[in-house]
Image (cartoon, rainbow, N blue to C red):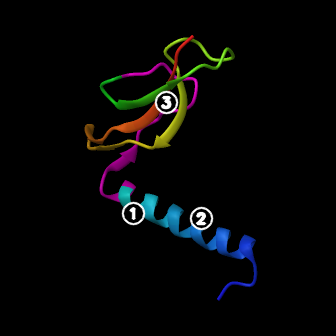
Amino acid sequence: TYQDVDSFRSGVELIRKQFLEALRRVNVEQLPLQVGDHFDALNAEALTTFTDPSLPDGAVAAIYEQGFNLKGQLLRAARVVVNRL
């Protein structure tokens, strides 16, 4: 059992890092997508739109699920919110 929430969070983060490293070893890589990047329908699925004046029109406003590539081929598209002004 964990002593507190921070210990639990640290344990989960360690497992996440180890899992991503295992995926990387078999050539599965997370798409390099960040909030503010231009929405690309070839690598991301738009779930909905949002209006944020601090972001350009057509930019990624939020990322719900990261996307992944396997040896350069899209394995899973990212699921995102797109900014519309």
Q: Which mark is residue 13?
A: 2
Q: Quadrant of residue 12?
A: bottom right
The secondary structure type at the circle numbered 3 is: strand
The residue drawn where x is 74% and y is 70% is 6
The answer to which of 56 and 16 lies nearer the viewer is: 56
Disc 2 marks which amino acid?
Answer: Glu
Disc 3 marks which amino acid?
Answer: Val
The residue drawn where x is 41% and y is 38% is 79
Please tell me which of labels 3 and 2 falls first in the chain.
2
Q: Which mark is residue 81?
A: 3
Between the residue at mark 3 and the residue at mark 1, the CA separation in whole angstroms equals 28 Å
The answer to which of 66 and 72 lies nearer the viewer is: 66
Main secondary structure type of the part rendered in magenta = loop
Image coordinates of residue 45 in percent, x first then y, are 35, 32
Image coordinates of residue 33 in percent, x first then y, are 48, 33
**Does 59 lie within the magenta span?**
no
Between the residue at mark 3 and the residue at mark 2, the CA separation in whole angstroms equals 25 Å
Label 3–label 1 contact, CB within 8 A: no
Give the side of residue 5 with respect to residue 52, left or right: right
Q: Residue furthest bottom?
A: 1
The secondary structure type at the circle numbered 2 is: helix
Q: Nearer the viewer, mark 3 or mark 2?
A: 3
Q: Which residues are magenta?
A: 24-40
User: Which residue is denoted by mark 1 in the rendering?
Assistant: 22
* Quadrant where the C terminus is found in the figure: top right
Give the side of residue 43 with respect to residue 10, left or right: left
* Quadrant where the N terminus is found in the figure: bottom right
Disc 1 marks which amino acid?
Answer: Ala
Label 1–label 2 contact, CB within 8 A: no
